Image (cartoon, coloured by chain):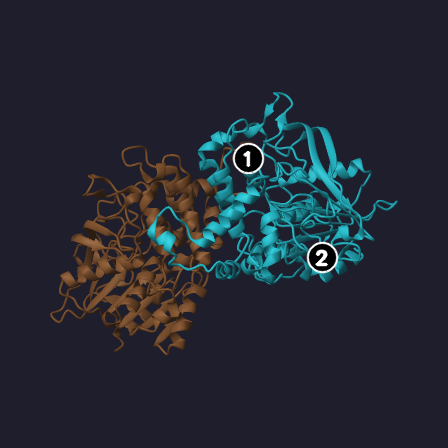
Chain colours: A cyan, B brown
Amino acid sequence: MFITQLFPKGLLAAVALLLSAQLNAAQSYSQTGQLVEKQRFELARFTTFGGKTIKQLQVGWESYGTLNEAKDNVVLITHYFSATSHAAGKYQHDDATPGYWDAIIGPGKAIDTDKYFVISVDTLANLNAYDPNVITTGPASINPDTGKHYGLTFPVVTIRDFVNVQKALLESLSIAKLHAVIGGSMGSMQALDWATAYPDWVPRMISVIGSGQSDAWTTALLEQWAIPIQLDKNWSNGDYYDKTPPTQGLTSALMFITQDALTPAFFNKTGRNLAYSPLEKGPLNDIRQQHSIVKWLKERAQSRAKLMDANHLLYLVRASQLYIAGHSGDMKQALSSVKAKTLFLPSFNDLLLMPYLAKDAVNSLEQLHKNTSYRELTGDLGHLNGVVGIEQAASDISAFLADKQ
Amino acid sequence: MFITQLFPKGLLAAVALLLSAQLNAAQSYSQTGQLVEKQRFELARFTTFGGKTIKQLQVGWESYGTLNEAKDNVVLITHYFSATSHAAGKYQHDDATPGYWDAIIGPGKAIDTDKYFVISVDTLANLNAYDPNVITTGPASINPDTGKHYGLTFPVVTIRDFVNVQKALLESLSIAKLHAVIGGSMGSMQALDWATAYPDWVPRMISVIGSGQSDAWTTALLEQWAIPIQLDKNWSNGDYYDKTPPTQGLTSALMFITQDALTPAFFNKTGRNLAYSPLEKGPLNDIRQQHSIVKWLKERAQSRAKLMDANHLLYLVRASQLYIAGHSGDMKQALSSVKAKTLFLPSFNDLLLMPYLAKDAVNSLEQLHKNTSYRELTGDLGHLNGVVGIEQAASDISAFLADKQ
């Protein structure tokens, strides 16, 4: 009763997402009876785009569907900033929610696991470092050379490094080509970088709520997420692993991320359910008290922060800031190498990665006479229309994947 | 040479504003030969909207033009969040820039000082507490009861308190009615609250880049400005006046405010002038280094922070969060008392106080059969179209002021 009062029907999916980066879906992959299993991929030695070495690199991955004999039915899903490789299905039948894109991944769904072998990989420095279902290497990992946590001695990693780890994993499975790569938000960065860096691997690329590069605006906006962590006195220049972690800074960063990924419409609906009022008595009487909507945001951020690492957030901010498709000085020039047919699905009211960013990439691809298309997602959720609202694009995605390249 | 390279023609005005909350204008009030003088207004005892007492309250004010004998030519200008009462003119002939709305305030300008007595007052808890031209009472002031800085013992103040201090000042000048009240952003909150609280005083009200109330979205967004200050270890729960102040937190807050008040278009122009690139070598090689656009933003914030007080920022955030025209539980009901003809001038690409906020207020006024109109400002500067770009509204403002009510 109380719960449904706070989060009526329409908001439930979004709220579930905010809490766990997962969503409810009509039919989950697990409902077919198959449970998802996390697997581990290791590389003894990995050289980053910036030329540094990471030893004993490990990442988690999961897959849905079956790899065919020709090994040519692979759809790679690249995940967004606060997500993991858990794109679909459940680990246990009683999991509260399935993976974040379960609405479009599964038997008979848009990304049909009766046809495709769908695979997804945890990024380096994955935000959810303490999630038992996540395997990642990042600042919170032990540096095998020193036996201590890396902290800020971990090398800067880029979107290209995420791509290269994924490629090494695919090669370890004797896969030499994708059917498609699809990602949302930070996942879209990986998807387009894949198509640019390894054009012979990628016949089809879908960018959801994405961009072609991080412009000055986006880089400054992403910096806002790093700042509260760096201000937290417990951050200690990233050297907090045997001490109290910078939980307040991390919580604040997650509050910013949540708001940036949503819209006034969503907040004001939530506000109505909280009986938010500008003139609430607590904040009127005491500068230390906060409005109901701020407390709501904070409580959710505190809950999410428990499985996350603050340094990992800084490294994901940096990877996203450094992003330019092709990872050279010129996006358009780099896009000239793309062989994929591409589809861009930004969200019309996205305040985080506004549609102009996808449009810029599409314009460049069109000028280069590439096969590209563009459609805006709708809904009240802004950036999260591409996560919680992804089902609206199901038929577009399905048709795009079925199309001969 | 270097300066003009960094900030070509079109950006100069905006950059000047970001640095000093003032702007260049074709003809400054001071060019008439008249210099502006800051004056002091004192109240022995003031009761806040929240029912607390402030003793020995002081605020600064300035005026342009001459009060007529009937004392019925008064135009009150209410200032925005990071501004002061310095709306027009110069204090010294060699001031780098005049007051922030000098483009529309002066002899022969939209707010014609040959006709009107224009007056502007520093708010309580004015952000620029250490500006020698600002007089304000706030957390940085000495509490006469204790001989110590108030810090967080200063009572929460509201937009209504700013209005009530202005009214007390006007009454001390034997003024009993305004010709008009006009304000931008946080100033628009004061302007509409004036029209709602004291309808017999206000025949004309102009809200520039404004809102009718702080909705849940706005309140959460404003909280983002408070958070970095509260995270700064030097903040010490606001008790830092005899110690190192929370300059890093304050600087971060100003970085957020600057970005929220601008647009991707502005940032990306600035980025081009900085030769910003996503893949800059510094941030690629070292997690501690930052992109050129971040450094640019930070340097400007550091420079502005020097005259500002961090606790004052928290109190202005709170005053803005608590804002609802009329300061009762219901905006529309409160607006029913408005007698003024009203004009709303939001900025079409405002990301801070989006146009829907002004439209909501206009819709309520229309439903109440009030005389109200709405026009969107244009330009590349988002929220700051209402400050730097105000000259575009000159003829609208001039006609609105000349019109019989």
Q: Which residue position holds label 1?
A: A311
Between A276 and B124, the one nearer to me in the picture: A276
Residue A338 spot, x, y in % from top left: 70, 49
* Type of the residue with mark 1: Asn
Q: For mark 2, what is the residue?
A: A371
Instruction: Residue A96: tell me if it is visible.
Output: yes
Query: Marks 1/2: CA distance?
Result: 39 Å
Residue pictured at 48% horizontal, 54% vertical = B265
Q: Earlier in the sequence, mark 1 or mark 2?
A: 1
Mark 1 and mark 2 residues within 8 Å of each other at the beta carbon: no
Do dots 1 and 2 share one subunit? yes
Residue that sits furthest to the front in the current view = A1
Numbered disc 1: what chain? Answer: A
Q: Is residue A50 above or below residue B195?
A: above
In screen coordinates, is A113 left or right of B143?
right
- Find residue B393 and report its image quarter: bottom left
Graded by Cα atoms within 10 Å as few (under 14), some (14 to 19) or many (20 or more), the crowding at tag 1 reads many
Residue A26's x, y, as percent? 71, 59
Q: Residue furthest top?
A: A146
Residue at x 37% of width, y 68% of height: B344
User: Tag 2: Cα neighbours inside 10 Å, few (<14), some, or many (≥20)?
Assistant: some
Horizontal and vertical percent position of residue A226: 50, 40
Q: Secondary structure at mark 2?
A: loop
